[in-house]
Every structure is written in structure tokens, then in C-alpha cells.
Amino acid sequence: MESAGPAQPANRDEADGSYPAPGVRIGAIFFVLRRRVLESHLGRAFVENLWFVAAVWIGLAFLASLLSIRLGISVALVEICLGMLAGNLLGLHSTPWIDVLAAFGSVLLTFLAGAEIDPDSLRRHLVPSLAIGSLSFLLPFLGAMAFARFVTGWAWPAAQIAGIALSTTSVAVVYAVMVESGLAAADLGKLILAACFVTDLGTVLALGILFASFDRWLVLFAAVLAVALAVLPRLTRLVVARWGGRVSEAEVKFLLLVLTVLGGLATTARSEAVLPAYLVGLVVAGVFSHDRQTLHRLRATTFALLTPFFFLRAGALIALPALWAGLGLIAVLLGVKVATKFLGVWPLTRLFRLEPRTGLYTTLLMSTGLTFGSISALYGLTHGIITQDQYSVLVTVVIASAVVPTLIAQTWFQPTGPTADRAATAPVEVGHRS
């Protein structure tokens, strides 16, 4: 009787007779165990219980805060990284109520970014913010679009989506970094935020001009937005003067009402709720320059409760398998974005006489992207302009651009010395060497 021979491992690759690497086998075992735990009675009870799910997300947010304090980097970046790890290793995924909190977080964060722009400072630095913001949009848009069309061979509409998605600067990430670094109240921070506004305005206009379907909803949204921006400064001042400073927080609820109504009109018109949010913040900034308490209360609620869901969810959307499959293209596209941002922004920081370290810090922050980049890529996917693979590549590049340039800026180029000291207490005069 013939011997059957030694038994072969069940996980042998039958195609070439090879065996998976130890890391692959360990990863496969981990995912099998995770699936069995989640499919068990206790696991299903855990993931279906609203309070347990909330505890996981808030626990990750708390851990991100501790790591941020320990490592000295932006909590937004830590939340994105933890979200990516939890999404791929622990099966963290969003739910409808988390989507709502994340949407509120992005809208309020964008509103606060606009409200932090001092109108007097914006007028004083109008030329540098317009110049930096315009080239920060134009060169990456043209560079990424040309690369996607002529190097990767994407169709023209898909290449245009790539150019738009990679031309953005993340107001959400930059604003979070500005607040944590103490630069939000300084002229340098206000200049960067104003330039971010100009860049993202260019992104929105490009998306609207190239792909918009002009209908009655778009006309209605534009008309209501124009009227709202005209009357909101006076109306907000009236609400704050008459009902502000009370336990009922009437002025905060009024602002939330305005943002939700305009957000509803924006999404109905196939735009995005963050666009009117930033413009509303910009026009009422003058009101809150004299009423900082309302802004501080709104900021505390936003950063403590809402933005962790936004950033954790953004990280959880990164699929590691897709990242590995297109790693080369992702790295090249990230390089194209950062290189074209440097070509557009760095020379202007020298022209406007920022110190070299401050100029590099500004350029790196202008190289970030998250909200509008993801929105642009999602618009392309849902309208059939780009494929699922192209979408995965673009979103991964966008999220990587929120992490890599900011991490480099915060670690090696954050303004120090007299400039940083003044940033925490008094405006920095941009346009003059310190």
C-alpha cells in the first residue's frame, strides 16, 4: 500500500506551489478571528448597540487626544491615522448617525475657519492671500490634470476630476492645526486660512464650470445664498445683542439653523454644504471679532464632539488593499500635488518676505487636502466620470496629503522663537521680516 506522503498545508498556493509569507498568514488568521468574533452572539450585540458603538468612536477620539499631546502633533492627523487602522484592522465602519455627526463636524469646522478670519487682517493682506491662494489652486490643477491625462492615460473628464481633487487645500485640517499651534489668532494663521479660502473657491468654481448642470435649483441656491450673505452680518448682530449670552444659547441655534437651511439648498442643487458654511463664517467674522465667547463655546462643542467623527471617518474610508495595489501611482500623484504647490506658493512666500522657515511651513500647509478633495472625487464617482479604482487612488492621495505635508510642517518647520511667541499673544506682521 502506497504511502500518501506528508500532508500539505491547507494554505498552500496551488498555482505555483509557494506558501504565503508569515506576515500574510498571520494577517489571514487575524481577519478570520475578527470575523468570527463579530459574527458571534456577543459580537453582534456589541456592534448593534448604539452606546457601545459610540464608546468605540469616542474612545478612539480620546486615545487620539492622548497621542496628540504625547507626540506633539495635530490631533486631526492622529484621528485620521487611528481611523485608518481601526477601519482596516478592527472593521470600524460608519453608520447613518455617525455620518450625520461627521457632516455636522465638517460644516461647523469650515464655518469656524471662515469666522476666524479677521476682516481687517484679510483686507490688510488681501494681495498676498489672493496671490498665494490663486496659484495654490491653478498650478496643481493644471499639473495633476496633465499628468492624469498624458501619463496615466485617463480620459479628459477623469483627468479634470483628478486636477480638481488634487488642487485643494484642506481648510478643516489647516484650521485645526492653526488652533492647536496658537496661530489661529495671528496674522500668519489668518493669511494662511484666507489663502486656503481662495484655493478652495477656485476648486468649487472649476467643478461648477466644468461639470455643473444649470437648473432652477442652482439658481435658487445662488439667489438665497446671495441674499443670506448680504443680510446675515446685521441679522446675526441683532440676534447676539438681543438674545445672546443666555443659557438657551439662542445665537448658536440661530447659526445652526442658517447653516442647515443653506446646506440643504446646496446639496439639493448638487453642491456641498461646506461651501455656504465657509462663506457664512466669512461674512459674520466681523460680528464675532467683538463676541469671542460665542465662538469659543461653538468651537469647544465642535472639537470635543463633532470633528473626531469627521476625521476618524475620513481615515476609516482608506482601504489598505487598494492602497497597496496602487501605491506607486498614489506616491507619484502625491508628489505631483506637493511639487506643484511648492512651485506656486514657495516663490510667493519669498516675494512677500516671509522667513524661509515660515515660508516652508506655509507651503506645506497649503499642500494639504481632505474635505473638498474627497468631495470632488466622490462627485466624479457618483456621476460616472471616474471608475472605482480611480476614485480609490484619488481619495488615498487626498487623505495622504492631509497627513504627510502637515506632519512634516508640524515636526520640522513650525514657526519658533519670536514669531511663535507673538503668534500666541499678538498678530504677526506678514510682509515684514521678523
Image (cartoon, rainbow, N blue to C red):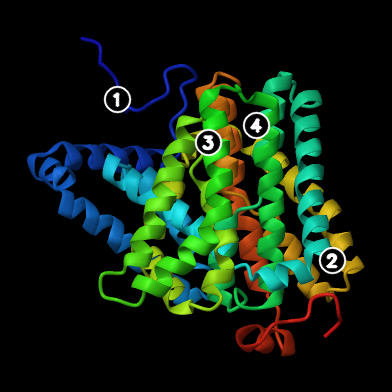
Q: Nearer the viewer, mark 1 or mark 3?
A: 3
Q: Earlier in the sequence, mark 2 or mark 4?
A: 4
Q: Amino acid at mark 3?
A: Phe
Mark earlier in primary sequence (2, 3): 3
Residue type at numbered disc 4 = Gly
* Residue 40 coordinates in the image, percent (x, y): 12, 39
- Label 2 to label 1: alpha-carbon separation: 70 Å
Between label 1 and label 4, give the one nearer the viewer. 4
Image mark for residue 208: 4
Residue type at tag 1? Pro
In the rendered image, the vertical position of residue 307 relative to residue 70, given as above or below: above
Q: Give the SS element for disc 3.
A: helix
Q: Which residue is mark 1?
A: 6
User: Which one is in front, 341 or 392?
Assistant: 341
Of the residues under marks 2 and 1, which one precedes in the sequence?
1
Could you classify mark 2 by the number of other residues whose Cα lies within 10 Å: few (under 14), some (14-19), or many (20 or more)? many
Find residue 410 and report its horizontal and vertical position in percent.
63, 70
Chain-order first, disc 1 or disc 3: 1
Q: Residue furthest right?
A: 351
Task: Assign a secondary structure to mark 2.
Answer: helix
Mark in the foreground, 2 or 1: 2
How far apart are the alpha carbons under marks 4 and 3? 13 Å
Q: Which residue is mark 2?
A: 349
Q: CA distance from mark 2 to mark 3?
A: 36 Å
Say which amino acid is labelled 2: Thr
Name the residue furthest left: 41
- View extreme (top): residue: 1
